[in-house]
């Protein structure tokens, strides 16, 4: 028996594509034993143990330098290759080589781009799919393998054995309309697959890089055939379109979750014919996952009011027959099983019998043979976690051939649905809503027992149709408590088919509009000389939908320009100044109005809220109010007193501090509540000026005083013969600091001047302190101090100059 016969003795052949076993044998002195060997070069033989005939006969071999300064650069293509049924043989010069094998199940050599000598593999294009007839076609199922650092030594025996993977350098893209409604089954339904990678390099990677691959500006196209579902009335599904595209073979492509992979996403566009002649068109919808080399990218299109695209990566297994030397054949009607609870596959074999098995202790609870060579697989549905498909396998064995079938538990989509996916509730108007649940193949249950927003009258039901009533929840709202936030607003309720694991959702929208401060919105009053004010109110809180209110109106014209920021939950509106009233005393006083608005998610839910505009504050709160007289020379006397400040507002005097004048030959100060309320600075006999100051904060919030405090001011000439003559009467308001007694005046030190007002008046009297309030002194002014507005209104009685 020669070397070749020894090599093959007792070996089984597995024709599944993928594993390439390499054997190298050489003997430069024994040329008769190496058929086809020439020039002393060793003979290199590849034994392809799982390759079909086309794979072997289409394989091309390229040599790249394996060492030295040109390591990794192209050297030459092996021209003379001897093809056997399951092996390749060729003569190769001695040296260290990086060997690249390229093949496909069809003749592909016309599309292969030959490498350039002395250039690196990653910089050389190996394949580029070119458009033809305005579309981008699929490429062949190109397979590649790299064998780096293979040493061939001349002049001696070489015996080396190893293995490598001859795997696809492409991905299969499957596109299907998984669920639709209203499409014309006789119409034309077009698909475009865009931004498709086109180019591979000689390392098997995408060119120029995986992060930025070359993509086609011309789409791949296909036409769906749509048919109505027989098990789900009103639902439709299409056949599957297939596309083969270049895929990136990174340095970790054999890992379950490779990192060295493409990062750019393809897009789909559709033009689907609808019943009645209209078209459903969507453009450039991104596929959420990227293709994986030697894998299947399954793209599912869900056509409703919009186009939803889902994608999964599946294994791409060769569905070919397995055989051993006794010619046992074993195949199944599907390469993998996807189920929720139970599924059946069928076996075809020429063996007299077969056996089935599965891992024990897992979620597959039963695998049994049934009639017609069927295999029934049952899964545990109770331990399934929603949204987390799980994988296992079963094995089928006939004689010496064993086939492993992947099994994935996942929902049977479309077996449960609700007729209304959004239930909107609002106070008084929509307290109850109903939904119809259709469950096919099994009963159903809610996964959320207490969704808070609304409560269902039942939590589960049987297969078929069930009507479920939801009743709105409500609670006394307090924005400082959590309960209102839990009850009002939106939530999703998941309903699940307990047999098929499929789910559907119902959105509960519990609308509620809360207005703080007993349903009253506080409006800003204009300040200073402004005639309008803008209010940014956080008194309103909206729940439900996008938390939007709209359709604003107010019966009062002074409330206008109303808007709502649903993100910040802020109500903005403008109010006018309260002026121009028939009675001037009513100007800048507080007033009330209303505004109306509706909930955007429940348009018939309208709220009327009060609007309160506060009193206009003329000046900020002050601490000291000062009255000062100044003149040119001679002696002046003043008298300052509170008068007419009875709490009842009838003009009578308040016995607590009224009619207690300060001035020369009168009181020096008036005390109230243990503090100096009014104080005189002293007698100025030579034009130094005389001052009295009012300690305003003492009366802030005083329950024994009216809102408006009146202060009467008198003055007279003490020097005979001076009257009539003018004086300057000035009022000051100070915030903070201290009132220092300087001569006959009080001077504020360290405070802030908030307000001053001056008048020049004629003083017509001389002396008369005994009758200062009844004509002895000239009545100069009445100052009315508003304790709320912090304003000082002055009525000048003396003649002004």
Image (cartoon, grey):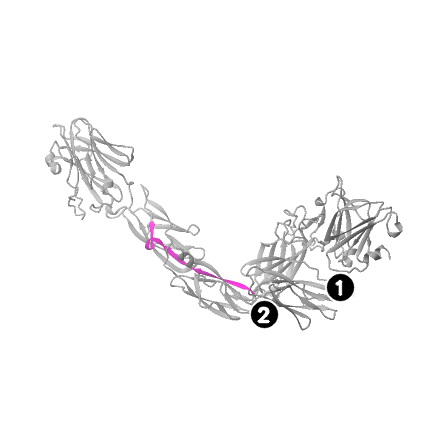
**Between 189 and 438, which is closer to the camera in this rendering?**
438
> Which of the pair 338/4 is nearer the observer?
4
Which residue appears at 39% of the width and 57% of the height?
A: 513
> x and y percent of residue 699 in the render?
23, 42
Estimate the spatial distance between the alpha carbons at disc 2 and disc 1, rounded to whole Å. Answer: 39 Å
Q: Are marks 2 and 1 in contact (CB under 8 Å)?
A: no
Secondary structure, mark 2, is loop
Q: Is residue 438 above or below residue 488?
A: below
Secondary structure mostly taken by the magenta-highlighted segment of the chain: strand
* Range covered by the magenta-colored residues: 501-522
Residue nearest the observer in this picture, 43 or 733: 43
Left or right: residue 10 compared with residue 275: right
Residue at the extreme left: 770
* Residue sitting farthest toward the bottom: 371
721 to the left or right of 487: left
Q: Taking the image as drawn, is residue 797 in sight?
A: no
Answer with left or right where residue 299 lies relative to residue 797: right
Could you tell me residue 379's position as x and y percent?
A: 60, 66
Mark 2 closeness class: few <14, some 14–19, many ≥20 residues within 10 Å: few
- The residue most toward the front is 361
Q: Position of residue 726 (x, y in %)?
A: 18, 31
Q: Which residue is identified by label 2?
A: 231
Residue denoted by label 1: 323
Where residue 273 sits: x, y (%)? Answer: 59, 62
Image quarter in which the C terminus is found: top left
Label placed on residue 97: none
Residue at 29% in and 50% down: 591
Mark 1 element type: loop
Asked if the magenta segment contains residue 504, the reply would be yes
Tally the marks. Answer: 2
Q: Image quadrant for the N terminus?
A: bottom right
């Amino acid at each position: 028996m020669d070397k070749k016969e020894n090599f093959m003795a007792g070996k089984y052949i597995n024709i599944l594509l993928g594993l390439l076993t390499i054997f190298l044998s050489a003997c430069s002195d024994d040329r008769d034993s190496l058929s086809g060997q020439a020039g002393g070069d060793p003979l290199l033989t590849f034994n392809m143990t799982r390759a079909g005939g086309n794979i072997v006969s289409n394989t091309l071999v390229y040599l790249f330098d394996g060492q030295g300064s040109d390591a990794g650069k192209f050297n030459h293509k092996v021209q003379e290759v001897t093809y056997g049924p399951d092996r390749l043989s060729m003569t190769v010069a001695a040296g260290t080589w990086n060997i690249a094998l390229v093949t496909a199940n069809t003749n592909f050599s016309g599309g292969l781009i030959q490498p350039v000598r002395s250039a690196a593999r990653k910089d050389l294009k190996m394949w580029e799919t070119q458009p033809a007839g305005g579309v981008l076609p699929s490429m062949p199922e190109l397979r590649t393998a790299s064998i780096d650092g293979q040493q061939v030594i001349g002049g001696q025996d070489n015996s080396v054995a190893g293995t490598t993977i001859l795997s696809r350098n492409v991905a299969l893209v499957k596109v299907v309309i998984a669920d639709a409604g209203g499409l014309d089954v006789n119409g034309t339904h077009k698909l475009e697959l865009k931004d498709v990678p086109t180019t591979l390099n000689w390392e098997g990677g995408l060119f120029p890089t995986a992060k930025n691959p070359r993509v086609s500006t011309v789409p791949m196209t296909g036409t769906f055939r749509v048919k109505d579902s027989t098990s789900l009335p009103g639902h439709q599904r299409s056949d599957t379109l297939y596309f083969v595209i270049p895929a990136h073979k990174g340095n970790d492509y054999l890992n379950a979750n490779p990192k060295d992979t493409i990062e750019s996403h393809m897009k789909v566009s559709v033009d689907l014919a609808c019943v009645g002649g209209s078209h459903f068109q969507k453009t450039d919808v991104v596929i959420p996952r990227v293709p994986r080399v030697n894998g299947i990218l399954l793209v599912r299109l869900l056509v409703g009011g919009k186009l939803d695209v889902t994608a999964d990566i599946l294994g791409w297994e060769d569905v070919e027959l397995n055989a051993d030397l006794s010619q046992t054949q074993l195949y199944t009607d599907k390469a993998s099983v996807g189920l929720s609870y139970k599924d059946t596959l069928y076996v075809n074999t020429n063996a007299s019998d077969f056996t089935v098995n599965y891992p024990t202790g897992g979620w597959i609870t039963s695998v049994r043979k049934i009639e017609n060579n069927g295999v029934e697989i049952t899964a545990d549905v109770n331990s399934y976690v929603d949204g987390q498909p799980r994988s296992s396998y079963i094995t089928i064995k006939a004689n010496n051939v064993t086939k492993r079938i992947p099994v994935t538990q996942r929902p049977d989509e479309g077996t449960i649905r609700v007729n209304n996916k959004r239930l909107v509730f609002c106070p008084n108007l929509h307290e109850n809503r109903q939904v119809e649940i259709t469950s096919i193949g099994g009963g159903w249950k809610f996964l959320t027992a207490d969704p808070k927003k609304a409560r269902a009258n039942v939590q589960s039901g049987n297969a078929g149709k069930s009507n479920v009533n939801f009743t709105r929840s409500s609670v006394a709202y307090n924005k400082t408590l959590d309960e209102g936030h839990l009850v009002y607003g939106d939530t999703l309720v998941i309903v699940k088919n307990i047999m098929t694991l499929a789910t559907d959702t119902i959105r509960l929208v519990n609308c509620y509009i809360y207005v703080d401060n007993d349903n009253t919105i506080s409006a800003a009053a204009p300040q200073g000389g402004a005639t309008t004010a803008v209010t940014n109110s956080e008194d309103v809180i909206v729940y439900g939908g996008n938390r939007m209110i709209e359709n604003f109106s107010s019966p009062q014209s002074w409330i206008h320009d109303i808007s709502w920021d649903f993100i910040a939950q802020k109500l903005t509106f403008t109010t006018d100044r309260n002026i121009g009233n028939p009675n001037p005393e009513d100007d800048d006083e507080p007033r009330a109005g209303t505004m109306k608005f509706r909930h955007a998610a429940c348009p018939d839910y309208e709220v009327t809220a009060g609007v309160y505009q506060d009193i206009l504050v003329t000046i900020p709160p002050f601490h000291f109010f000062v009255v000062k007289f100044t003149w040119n020379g001679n002696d002046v006397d003043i008298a300052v007193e509170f008068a007419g400040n009875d709490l009842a507002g009838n003009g009578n005097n308040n016995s607590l501090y009224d009619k207690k004048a300060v001035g020369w030959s009168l009181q020096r100060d008036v005390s109230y509540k243990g503090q100096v309320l009014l104080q005189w600075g002293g007698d100025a006999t030579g034009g130094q000026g005389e001052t009295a100051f009012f300690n305003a904060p003492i009366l802030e919030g005083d329950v024994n005083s009216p809102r408006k405090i009146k202060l009467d001011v008198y003055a007279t000439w003490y020097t005979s013969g001076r009257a009539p003559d003018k004086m300057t009467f000035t009022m000051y308001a100070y915030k903070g600091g201290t009132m220092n007694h300087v001569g006959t005046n009080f001077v504020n030190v360290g405070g802030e001047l908030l307000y001053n007002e001056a008048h020049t008046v004629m003083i017509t009297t001389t002396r008369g302190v005994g009758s200062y309030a009844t004509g002895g002194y000239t009545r100069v002014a009445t100052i009315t101090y508003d304790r709320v507005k912090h304003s000082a209104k002055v009525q000048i009685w003396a003649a002004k100059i």
